[in-house]
Image (spheres, helix red, strand yellow):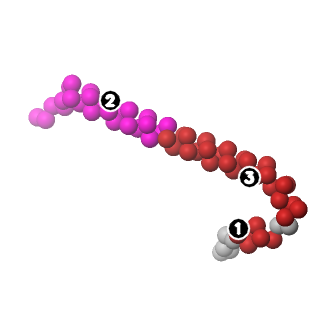
Amino acid sequence: MTESPNFSIIAQEVPVAELHHLQPVVLLLQTAASRNERWTKYGEEEASRRNSAQQHAEHLHPLDSG
């Protein structure tokens, strides 16, 4: 099994003059991270809404225990 590359070493090997070529990659990663963060927040909010709605429904119509 091969190990994951050490990204800090890779970054150190890129000449400073070439860093501008990485800008689109950095922007893509930032955009993906931002979208992931928003979807995670949306998912947490949606789960909270569903949980609240379920609790409200159970309060209005408790399940028969017998």
Q: Earlier in the sequence, mark 2 or mark 1?
A: 1
Is residue 5 shown to the viewer in this render? Answer: no
Q: Which mark is residue 28?
A: none
Residue in view at x 77 percent, y 70 percent = 12
Q: Which quarter of the image is occupied by the N terminus?
A: bottom right
Residue in view at x 49 percent, y 41 percent = 41
Q: Amino acid at mark 3?
A: Val
Q: Is residue 54 above or below residue 31?
A: above
**Label 2 close to label 1 by CB (< 8 Å):** no
**Label 3 close to label 1 by CB (< 8 Å):** no
Q: Which quarter of the image is occupied by the C terminus?
A: top left
Foreground label between 2 and 3:
3
Q: Amino acid at mark 1?
A: Phe
- The region drawn magenta spans 42-66
Is residue 46 found left or right of 38 in the rendered image? left
Q: Is residue 10 above or below residue 26?
A: below
Q: Earlier in the sequence, mark 3 or mark 1?
A: 1
Residue in view at x 84 percent, y 64 percent = 16
Give the Cα separation between the discs numbered 2 and 3.
Answer: 40 Å
- At mark 3, the secondary structure is helix
Residue at the spot of label 1: 7
Residue at the spot of label 2: 53
Give the overall secondary structure of the magenta segment: helix
Give the Cα separation between the discs numbered 3 and 1.
Answer: 13 Å
Foreground of the two, 17 or 38: 17
Q: Position of residue 63 (x, y in %)?
A: 19, 31
Q: Residues within 10 Å of mark 1 (few under 14, many from 20)?
A: few
Residue at the spot of label 3: 26
Q: Residues within 10 Å of mark 3 (few under 14, many from 20)?
A: few
